[in-house]
Amino acid sequence: MDQLPRTLRVLWDLEPKPTRTTGPALSRDRIVRAAVELVDEQGMDALSMARLAERLGRATMSLYRHVASKDELQAVMLDAALGEPPRPNDPTAGWRAGLETWARALLAVYRRHPWMPRMEITGPPLSPGQLGWLEAGLVLLRDTALEPIERMSVMLLVSGYVRNEASIAIVGDEVRRDAGPDSARETVEQVAQLLDPQRFPALAEMVESGAFTAAPFDFDHFTYGLRLIMDSIAARVNHQMTGR
């Protein structure tokens, strides 16, 4: 275990905690909670060790006894903010209902913490929180006829879809907040008027139908896309079952 990178040792609680205190109740958990609160309120750009120390009422260097760097802090923040994955209320409801609940729960996490889906992906999921969510999804697929590698691929597909949809929704929220609830729609409608049917025939057809200007605002893209994904997974599951 000593060969593991320090950040992973911290995430898996394998790194010794400081024994000398720097003041009452300062701990890695408290630092992480304060950091999550800060970026939830002000965004990831607001995060710095100095600002976090000020929020905690401590000297900046005291934080480094608990987290070695800002990168390490962000990794632990991500893991902490994920929380626990949902547990099926009805185990007999089937993999599809369970996986839809899983996807919506992950979307809710991202909407509560808008900085999360914007964090750079630097490698496979290796933290306890990430693996806990992956485990919960794989368990739902365990009784299907899908091969193990197919189950993993399904989880990569669904988690990637949720992350992408959350990112789009968060940008929309920010635009409406900063420029007003109608500004985004007005901009889309203005751009729609610029579309040359010769150059953009498919988009022009969307404009004519009203879908181009209505879809980003009045259509539940997440539910529609999730349904398509679930339909394709179900088709593969049925194919595997009938092919055996």
Image (tube, grey):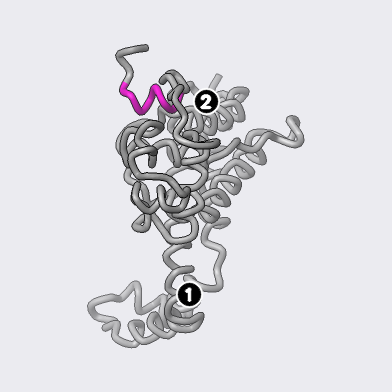
Residue type at mark 2: give it.
Leu
> Magenta segment, which residues?
5-12
Depicted 102 relative to depicted 196: above or below: above
Of residue 44 and residue 49, the one placed in the foreground of this image is 49
Depicted 24 relative to depicted 224: above or below: above
Depicted 217 relative to depicted 228: above or below: below
Rendered residue at 49%/27% (across/down): 128
Q: Position of residue 168 (x, y in %)?
A: 43, 61
Q: CA distance from mark 2 to mark 1?
A: 44 Å
Q: Residue furthest left?
A: 199
For label 1, the SS is: helix
Residue type at mark 1: give it.
Arg
Rendered residue at 51%/32% (across/down): 129
Name the front one of labels 2 and 1: 1
| Residue 177 numbered mark, or none | 1
Residue assigned mark 2: 146
Of residue 151 and residue 57, the one placed in the foreground of this image is 57
Q: Position of residue 115 (x, y in %)?
A: 42, 53
